[in-house]
Image: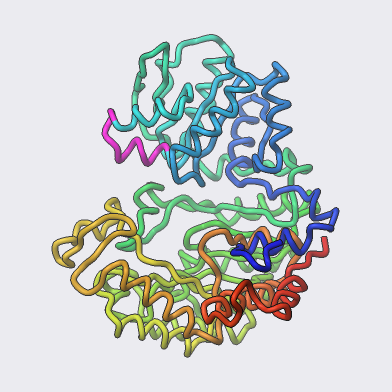
Amino acid sequence: MYKNNPCTVKDVIYEANCNNQDFQHKKMMLSPTAAYLGTFLHRKGYTCHIINALDHQREDLIKGLVSGQVMTVAISTTYYLSAHAIADLVTFIRKRNKQIKIIIGGTFIANRYRFDDKETFLRMADKIGADVYIVDKQGEMALSEVIRAYKTNNSLKDVNNIVYKDGKQYYVTNIQEENNSLEENLVDWSLFKKDITRMVFIRSCISCPFSCAYCTYHIYAGKYYHISVDAIEQELNALKQTNKAQHIFFTDDTFNVPVDRFKEILRMIIRNQYNFEWDSFLRCQYLDEEAVDLMKKSGCQQVFLGIESGSQKILDNMNKKAKVEDYKRALNLLKKYGIYVCCSFIIGFPGETEETVNETFQLIDECKPTFYQLNLWKYIHDAPIYQNREQYGLKGDKMAWKHNTMDARTALDKYLELYLKIEDSIHIPVFDYDLFYLYDLGMNQEQIKSLMYFFNQGIKETFKKCHKKGISDHLWEQLMAAAKCSL
């Protein structure tokens, strides 16, 4: 029972649907990484079994590990934030099968290899305890070559872009950046018919064409490129044939750039009359009325906008290449066409003051986006802003920082002030909230709005200490009703 205790959005959903058998037995969404790598390995002649979510498929994993039919386990670290969590998974696997070969790749490993010195990386590898680490930011070719070497009982020394352990010794092979074509490896959705649920993720580009000063994505992901509209159409047609997907999320960091390509994609979707809705990330300063009209006609339900600040000074410091007035124009257009908006803001970036925070509030108060997210700025030394640290008087690391005009504690205070002050837009938490999971449960935008409205009312009630313990009975009943799923 969560009513009288701290809880997350997911806790509320589980509580509200604890007696719903369809909810209890619902499959998890298909991981986009698993779909892509599964397709790649299939085309190389290998078979694989996908574990989407360990918490829900623990028994499936154990069954595979003890079957004697599995030679390797590949772990993607795209969503991992610490080596400790990866080490726990490796220990779990080793307890069930000591002979199986464990291969680890993905964003976390590639970034640590790139930014740590060799000795630090190898200490981490030893702590994790896997057999092979793929250190290229793509790495799918290395994965297939490692599997081939194990199947043919050959040495790993000729496989590029890996760190592997032989006995007690680690070896680093030739490092040669992979350049795999996204267009030549479109997901084969026919391989995953039994795994597809309502919500499906599609990628049409790699990396980002922008270089915002706070962001490392364009650094980690490498050179930006996008696939053709014809390729997107081919993948959407294949997905339509499965007759399962109802909601698509285009995971591109900036789906509407280049602008002409974006409009061509929208016309293609309209022409094909697909039976699914879609969402995406956008750069809203590049929107015009023609684009927004096409978005609505093609089934766009919601967009995610990295606004980051309502202050032109801070936007310039961030290298956002955007004007506040362009933001206002685009937000009004999206509202005019009934497209839901979730705007993300950063509090505390170098140059931030009480005045610039107030400008962010004024933008939110004026434009009233459907949803908004507040993020405390995180000082990452890999990000471009680090090169200007002396100019801004930057000191510290991650969430412990200060600069000439603000420190992390003050930023947190301003964050809370904004949260309690904003009334006409609904706050979305950054962590432990998954909109796509809600879509997959069959919730529509109005249901999600209702759920998040009552959830935030509960938080604000707690802040104001209206009740000594928990939230009011009436509000809890409203929250439970909003969280009900009808699968």
Instruction: State yes or no: residue 342 in magenta.
Output: no
Q: Residue 363's x, y, as percent?
A: 43, 85
Q: Which residue is drawn at 59% across and 64% down?
A: 6
From the viewer's perspective, tell me whether residue 426 is left or right of residue 379: right
Q: Is residue 322 visible to us here?
A: yes
Q: Tell me the quarter of the picture where residue 442 sits.
A: bottom right
Q: What stretch is highlighted in magenta?
A: 109-119
- Viewport quadrant of the C terminus: bottom right
Q: Residue 98's x, y, as percent?
A: 58, 17
Instruction: State yes or no: residue 113 in magenta.
Output: yes
From the viewer's perspective, tell me whether residue 141 is left or right of residue 126: right
Q: Which residue is drawn at 71% across and 61% down?
A: 1
What kind of colouring is applied to the model shown?
A: rainbow
Q: Which residue is drawn at 27% across and 52% down?
A: 381
Q: Is residue 291 visible to us here?
A: no
Q: Tell me the quarter of the picture where residue 33 sits.
A: top right
Q: Tell me the quarter of the picture where residue 461 sits.
A: bottom right
The front one of 265 and 40 is 40
Q: Which residue is drawn at 63% across and 36% down?
A: 39
Q: Residue 426's x, y, as percent?
A: 57, 78
Q: Residue 106's x, y, as percent?
A: 47, 39
